[in-house]
């Protein structure tokens, strides 16, 4: 119930801020941006002979997973240093 209240306050705050901003029409280039992105993706897909995208995606996901694990270890070390009353080092 407390989380719902906080979310309600956050939503009302965002609604208040967005209602204070002026409304403007969508530019023409933004409405045709999807077709441009689609043509870039189509052109990039034809380059898979030179760059194996599945390997590149696997490397990127592995790298992000390693970063997430390293960040998690750092957070655990920081929390652990608080539990030892400052006797440990989180640096």
Image (tube, helix red, strand yellow):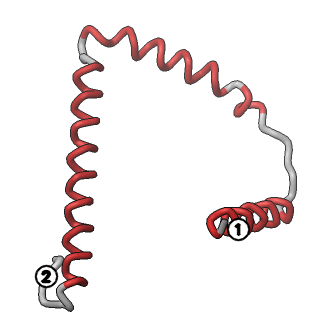
Residue 57 is left or right of residue 17, and the answer is: left
Q: With respect to residue 60, does 2 lie above or below?
A: below
Give the residue pinned by disc 1.
Answer: 5
Mark 2 Cα within 10 Å, few/some/many (few <14, many 20+)? few
In this view, the residue in front, 53 or 14, is 14
Residue found 78% across the figure and 64% down from its top? 12
Q: In the rendering, at what x and y percent does residue 23 appear? A: 87, 52
Q: Quadrant of the C terminus?
A: bottom left
Foreground mark, 1 or 2, reads 1
Q: With respect to residue 83, does 25 lie above or below?
A: above
| Quarter of the figure with residue 46 | top left
Q: With respect to residue 3, does 56 lie above or below?
A: above
Residue found 56% across the figure and 23% down from its top? 37
| Quarter of the figure with residue 25 | top right
Residue found 66% across the figure and 65% down from its top? 1
Give the residue pinned by disc 2.
Answer: 89
The mark found on residue 58 in the picture is none
Q: Secondary structure at mark 1?
A: helix
Q: In the rendering, at what x and y percent does residue 69 appear? A: 22, 52
Alpha-carbon span between mark 1 and mark 2: 37 Å
């Amino acid at each position: 119930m407390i989380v719902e209240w906080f979310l309600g306050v956050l939503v009302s705050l965002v609604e208040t801020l967005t209602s204070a901003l002026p409304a403007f029409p969508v530019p023409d280039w933004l409405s045709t941006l999807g077709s441009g992105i689609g043509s870039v993706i189509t052109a990039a897909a034809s380059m898979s002979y030179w760059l194996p995208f599945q390997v590149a995606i696997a490397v990127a996901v592995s790298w992000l997973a390693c970063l997430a694990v390293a960040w998690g270890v750092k957070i655990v070390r920081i929390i652990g240093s608080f539990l030892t009353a400052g006797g440990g080092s989180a640096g």
